[in-house]
Image (cartoon, grey):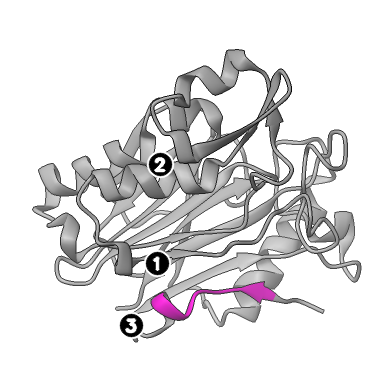
Amino acid sequence: MIEVYSFDDLKKYPNLLHAVSTKSKSYPYNFSLALHTGENKQCVVENRERIAGYLGLKNDWHFVVADQIHSDHIKIITKTDTKGWKNLDDAIEDCDALITDLKNVMLTILTADCVPVLLFDPKRKIVAAVHAGWKGTKSKIVAKTVLRMQEVFGSDPKDIVAAVAPSIGRCCYEVGEDVARHFFDIPKGYTKKGDKYMLDLPYINKYQLLDSGLLDAHIAMSNVCTACEVEHYFSYRKEKGCSGRFMSMIGMNR
């Protein structure tokens, strides 16, 4: 059985579609949607086709998948093509954020603890999907994505609606000072625990969105920790390494 997580804040826009996939024991690899982790390609493609069907996305929809590298590289999608959906070979190279104004194009992010952020400008009709691990968060990729929406499409940050999808929380994300020090300027972004730090990447990304000019009322937090909810979401840390990934996606209807 397929189940997805969704945000009430995004569901109120009739021309917007979004979803976050979850694990399912009914399908291969617990319904992993990742092609890059070594599982049987055909099984994963069939999983992807299953979620597309579940969401009612017909053949006139195109899916865009990035070859994520924990960078601050942003790609603006200008052609209505499917990329990286059935093959790794044509995925968007070296990229961790996608932006488009095209209709019937679903932007996707694959994660298993990192922070997926979905963005929508209802006035300019722009969507974006961002992958923010600690390296991307350090590089302020979500803030840079908002800036690109401003520069290229004329978005006003006050109009942008954001959704921070399930990701590892402060409760479970223990890191050393080598990682935590990059976020010492955000005191509420971590809790010290002996010589370690409990890092709150979802909160830090929210902080960066607020700093970019988004309104607090326009930022929806799932408050779901992937490590705590490992029965429902892939968690690389909780599972001590895993090949499965769940997908966060966003797109606009014609």
Which residue occupies 44% across, 75% down? 17
Q: Which residues are magenta?
A: 4-9
Query: Which residue is the site of mark 1?
Result: 251
Q: Earlier in the sequence, mark 2 or mark 1?
A: 2
Which residue corresponds to the image point at 86% horizontal and 61% vertical from the top-left? 231
Q: Which mark is residue 231?
A: none
- Nearer the observer, 160 or 224: 224
Q: Amino acid at mark 2?
A: Ala
Q: Position of residue 182 (x, y in %)?
A: 47, 20
Q: Amino acid at mark 3?
A: Tyr
Q: Note whether residue 95 is visible.
A: no
Residue under the point 17% across and 61% down:
158
2 or 3: tag closer to the N-terminus: 3
Label 2 sits on residue? 97
Q: CA distance from mark 2 to mark 3?
A: 22 Å
Residue 72 location, x and y as percent? 39, 28
How far from the left and from the top, in percent, is residue 236? 78, 39
Q: Looking at the picture, which amino acid does disc 1 mark?
A: Gly
Residue 168, compared with residue 16, is above or below; it is above
Q: Earlier in the sequence, mark 3 or mark 1?
A: 3
Say what secondary structure mark 1 lies in.
Answer: strand
Q: Say whether residue 8 is magenta.
A: yes
**Residue appearing at x 84%, y 45% in the figure:** 40
Element on which disc 2 rests: strand
